[in-house]
């Protein structure tokens, strides 16, 4: 490995590297699907409102599991069984997309697949934190998100290749072929977990009480952060609306998927540097920058009527995502006791997921009844409100 590579990965443990590989493979699979899923839904009769409902409803039931799985992983000081169960169950339901014939079939499959994510997300993030020194926490979460999005880049490229090779097939059959190929890396990821992920137990645990009592121990700073998270994510617009905006502007399927690829490339490029920057400067300045980029993203997408503005909008979307997701998780870890990481990260994921259904419905209604610009305006407004709340309540210094 080069000196630059060693410097880039300094502070990233073997366990985090393996979890990064797992996320790469899983997102390779998932983003092959996500790259074409909104287009597939339109082809089988879904509109903006129904797509918004599917995206929101897919997250909501799973969100209730995230805090529960995190709490149980703290209670028993075990993460790996939740990873195996969560990644394994998601892999098992993905093949059902191949035979889906209505938006309601897709809704059921998406809910079932997200249940697997609900089981694994908080224990996985807690294992990343368990395997990392405090001074490298932002970098570790940034690395994990970078691997996540590198898999998404590979998945989008793979989807484009499959679509190109299947150019002579009917549109729906091309999408189904993408779903079929996407199943393979999902199962490889489960094998990697089984063979290479190691537990990092031994956290000094306080006496565990009832679930509600444990939640109350997370503290005022944590719940202030959750207020910011809920305010922001109720208007955080699903990637599906970005793809639909490209289609609405007259772009071909290949161009729309290439724009999604651009988003993921930018995400990969900024995730690790932004995490490292938050280790030095503190989480709040980086998150405020990220939220401001989302406002600019929404303004750009609202005005986009051609390829240049669409490229700018998708690139800005990647900049926002890459500078926010890992840093927000590191911030959660900063403000809670070590023995409650799974619980706190589960509450974080649950807070995000529970507002996605009402947020998705509002975004879809605005899209159908007013126009795409209104959906993006809604997102910009909630981002401004969350920024003000974070500026007032957030930590000013690194942990």
Image: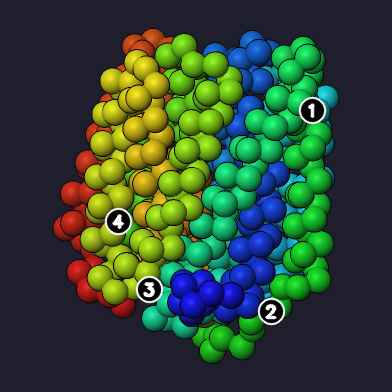
Q: Please tell me which of labels 2 and 3 falls first in the chain.
A: 2
Q: Quadrant of the N terminus?
A: bottom right
Marks 2/1 in contact by CB < 8 Å: the verdict is: no
Image position of 289 (left or right of 107): left
- Residue 109: quarter of image: top right
- Please provide percent x and percent y for residue 139: 44, 70
Count residues near mark 4 (Cα–Cα under 10 Å), then give few for <14, some for 14-19, many for 20+.
Answer: many
The total number of labels drawn is 4
The residue to which callout 4 is attached is 287
Q: Which residue is mark 1?
A: 177
Q: Earlier in the sequence, mark 2 or mark 4?
A: 2
Could you give the CA–CA distance between mark 2 and mark 3, rounded to whole angstroms?
21 Å
- For the residues carrying marks 4 and 1, which lies nearer the camera in this image? 1
What x and y, as percent, mark residue 100?
78, 23
The location of residue 59, given as percent across then percent down, is 57, 41
Q: CA distance from mark 4 to mark 1?
A: 39 Å
For mark 2, give the secondary structure: loop
- Taking depth in this image into account, of 237 and 215 the one nearest to the observer is 237
Q: Circle 2 is placed at which residue position?
A: 199
N-terminal of the two: label 2 or label 1? 1
Query: Going by the image, does 396 lie left or right of 225?
Result: left
Residue with the mark numbered 3? 334
Q: Identify which residue is drawn at 64% across, 83% down.
A: 201
């Amino acid at each position: 490995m080069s000196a630059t590579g060693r410097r880039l990965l300094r502070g990233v443990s073997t366990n985090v590297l393996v979890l990064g590989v797992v996320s790469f493979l899983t997102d390779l699979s998932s983003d092959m699907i996500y790259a074409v899923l909104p287009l597939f839904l339109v082809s089988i009769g879904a509109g903006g409102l129904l797509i918004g409902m599917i995206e929101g409803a897919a997250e909501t039931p799973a969100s209730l599991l995230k805090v529960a799985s995190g709490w149980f992983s703290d209670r028993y000081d075990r993460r790996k069984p939740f990873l195996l169960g969560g990644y394994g169950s998601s892999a098992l339901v993905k093949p059902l997309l191949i035979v889906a014939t209505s938006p309601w079939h897709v809704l059921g499959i998406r809910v079932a697949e997200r249940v697997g994510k609900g089981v694994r997300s908080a224990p996985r993030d807690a294992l990343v934190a368990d395997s990392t020194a405090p001074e490298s926490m932002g970098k570790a979460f940034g690395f994990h998100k970078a691997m996540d999005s590198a898999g998404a880049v590979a998945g989008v490229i793979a989807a484009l290749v499959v679509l190109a090779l299947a150019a002579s097939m009917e549109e729906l059959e091309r999408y189904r072929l993408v779903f079929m190929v996407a199943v393979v890396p999902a199962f490889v990821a489960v094998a990697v977990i089984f063979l290479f992920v190691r537990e990092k137990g031994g956290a000094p645990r306080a006496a565990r009480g009832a679930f509600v009592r444990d939640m109350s121990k997370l503290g005022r700073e944590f719940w202030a952060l959750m207020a910011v998270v809920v305010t922001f994510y109720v208007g955080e617009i699903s990637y599906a609306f970005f793809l639909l905006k490209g289609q609405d502007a007259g772009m071909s399927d290949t161009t729309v998927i290439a724009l999604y690829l651009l988003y993921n490339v930018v995400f990969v490029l900024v995730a690790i540097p932004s995490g490292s920057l938050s280790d030095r400067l503190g989480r709040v300045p980086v998150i405020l920058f990220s939220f401001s980029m989302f406002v600019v993203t929404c303004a750009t997408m609202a005005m986009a009527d051609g390829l240049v503005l669409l490229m700018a909008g998708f690139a800005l979307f990647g900049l926002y995502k890459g500078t926010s997701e890992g840093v927000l998780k590191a911030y959660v870890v900063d403000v809670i006791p070590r023995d409650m990481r799974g619980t706190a990260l589960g509450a974080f994921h649950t807070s995000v997921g529970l507002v996605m259904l009402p947020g998705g419905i509002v975004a879809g209604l605005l899209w159908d009844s007013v126009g795409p610009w209104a959906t993006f305006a809604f997102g910009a407004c909630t981002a401004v409100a969350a920024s003000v709340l974070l500026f007032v309540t957030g930590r000013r210094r690194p942990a």
